[in-house]
Image: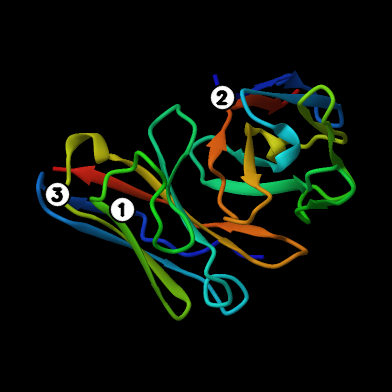
């Protein structure tokens, strides 16, 4: 199972929006509505930001939103804030044998 | 407090073994599937092992199959990862993470991680 493809970096000024793509195949992203997104600050554990493509856990700001079209999922961060600067990883369910695959990760910089 | 706390990491020679533990508290451990995810220095997250809620079914990534074994003790609220025949490429921070049985298929809580270094 190959890693999902994400751009290495993305950036925006405070208040702007940034969108990160996550491209997989019909065996993972395209085959299930089980895409999730994680935020990871340096030296910290990942934090769940989006699950089931577009749902936000309690406590996650509504500035974070998710979507999917075909084999590509996207995370949009609107109204960028300094604390949004972090690495972001997508993940998808991929079936019973190797059930989860992660993306390559995207470093978001707030200019 | 709801938390996952990993332990057992350290420095080991290639070919050696380590057993990682993940202690769960503050929630009903047996209601969750549990997983291990690792992150090599400066690299991304990689799923390596998962176990269902009662321990009767396990899955491992091809990269660790036959060398690593995931298990759990629901009476002690603890998840384990037995790592044998360690290689340099197994050097990473190892995180435990949970997924609710009811089916979000998302890792909604993670431990802080434990570092494993396989080096001579």
Residue that carries the numbered disc 2 in the rendered image: B2
Q: Residue at x 23, y 50 (%)?
A: A63
Q: Residue at x 82, y 25 (%)?
A: B19
Check if mark 1 and mark 3 are on a common chain. yes
Kindly state the secondary structure of the residue where label 2 is placed.
Answer: loop
Q: Dot 2 falls on which chain?
A: B
Mark pair 1, 3: CA separation = 18 Å
Residue that carries the numbered disc 3 in the rendered image: A79
Quarter holding the C terminus of chain B is: top right
Q: Dot 3 falls on which chain?
A: A
In depth, the one of B20 and A56 nearer the eye is A56
Q: Are marks 2 and 1 in contact (CB under 8 Å)?
A: no
Q: Is residue A76 above or below residue A67?
A: above
Image x and y of residue A44, in percent: 45, 28
Residue A66 visible to the viewer: yes
The quarter of the displayed image where residue B12 is located: top right
2 vs 3, front mark: 2
In depth, the one of A102 and B67 nearer the eye is A102
Quarter holding the N terminus of chain B is: top right
Q: Is residue B51 above or below residue B83?
A: below
Check if mark 2 and mark 1 are on a common chain. no
Residue A49's tag is none
Residue A104 visible to the viewer: no
Marked residue nearer the N-terminal end (1 or 3): 1
Image x and y of residue A3, in percent: 56, 61
Mark pair 2, 3: CA separation = 30 Å
Mark pair 2, 1: CA separation = 33 Å
Kindly state the secondary structure of the residue where label 1 is placed.
Answer: strand
Residue that carries the numbered disc 1 in the rendered image: A9
Image x and y of residue A99, in percent: 69, 60
The quarter of the displayed image where residue A2 is located: bottom right
């Amino acid at each position: 199972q190959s890693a999902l493809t994400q751009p290495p970096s993305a950036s925006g000024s405070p208040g702007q929006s940034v969108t990160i793509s996550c491209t997989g195949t019909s065996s993972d992203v395209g085959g299930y509505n089980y895409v999730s997104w994680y935020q990871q600050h340096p030296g910290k554990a990942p934090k769940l930001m989006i699950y089931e493509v577009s749902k936000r856990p309690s406590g996650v700001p509504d500035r974070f939103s998710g979507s999917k079209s075909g084999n590509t999922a996207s995370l949009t961060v609107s109204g960028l804030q300094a604390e949004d600067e972090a690495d972001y990883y997508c993940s998808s369910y991929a079936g019973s044998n190797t059930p989860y695959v992660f993306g390559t990760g995207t470093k978001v910089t707030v200019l | 407090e709801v938390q996952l706390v990993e332990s057992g990491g350290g420095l080991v020679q290639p070919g050696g073994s380590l057993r990682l533990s993940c202690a769960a508290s503050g929630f009903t451990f047996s209601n969750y599937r549990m997983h291990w995810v690792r992150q090599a220095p400066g690299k991304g997250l990689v799923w390596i092992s998962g176990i269902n809620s009662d321990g009767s079914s396990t899955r491992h990534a091809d990269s660790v199959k036959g060398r690593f074994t995931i298990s759990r003790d629901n009476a002690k609220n603890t998840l384990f990862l037995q790592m044998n025949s360690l290689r340099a490429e197994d050097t990473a921070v190892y995180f435990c993470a949970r997924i609710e049985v009811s089916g979000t298929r998302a890792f909604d809580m993670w431990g802080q991680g434990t570092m494993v270094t396989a080096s001579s």
